[in-house]
Amino acid sequence: MHDTYAKFKNDHGVPEIRIGVKEFKCAGASAPHDHPHIYLQMVAADTILCPYCATLFRYDSQLGPNESDPQDCVFLDNVNR
């Protein structure tokens, strides 16, 4: 099954990442320092805290579904597509 959710990471340990989606996966950091890639959903809220890495994700409607601020927080799997 193809995973269609955007995935984000926090390699720099920033306290907050702005993203353009409300349903996504958090990987924590790049391998081998990642945590279980957990599905998070903001529902009606505009923020959510990852229970593994404590990164605060904030929804930003100005960003696209695979964009983040800081920009390098988008997690790209090493898979051929």
Image (cartoon, rainbow, N blue to C red):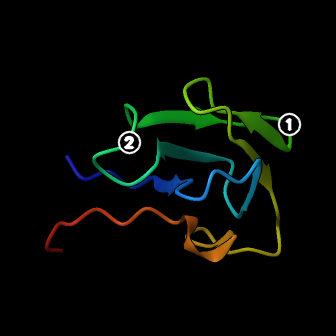
Nearer the observer, 21 or 74: 74
Packing grade of label 1 (10 A; few <14, some 14-19, many >=20) is few
Q: Secondary structure at mark 2?
A: loop
Amino acid type, residue under disc 1 in the picture: Ala
Q: Residue at x 71, y 54 (%)?
A: 14
Q: What numbered label is drawn on residue 14?
A: none
Q: CA distance from mark 2 to mark 1?
A: 25 Å
Q: In the rendered view, does 10 fall on the left or right side of 70?
A: left
Q: What numbered label is drawn on residue 45?
A: 1
Nearer the observer, 38 or 31: 31
In the rendered view, tell whether residue 76 sits above or below residue 22.
Answer: below
Residue 28 position in % (x across, y down) = 49, 43
Residue 46 position in % (x across, y down) = 85, 44
Q: In the rendered view, does 57 fall on the left or right side of 12?
A: right
Image quadrant holding the C terminus, namely bottom left
Q: Residue at x 77, y 51 (%)?
A: 16
Packing grade of label 2 (10 A; few <14, some 14-19, many >=20) is some
Amino acid type, residue under disc 2 in the picture: Asp
Q: Tag 1 or tag 2, which sits nearer the N-term? A: 2
**In this figure, which residue is indicated by the disc labeled 2?**
34
Specify the farthest residue to the top. Answer: 51
Residue 52, by quadrant, is top right
Nearer the observer, 24 or 32: 32
Q: Residue at x 69, y 70 (%)?
A: 70
In the rendered view, tell whether residue 63 sits above or below residue 34.
Answer: below
Q: Secondary structure at mark 1?
A: loop
In the rendered view, tell whether residue 23 sits above or below residue 65.
Answer: above
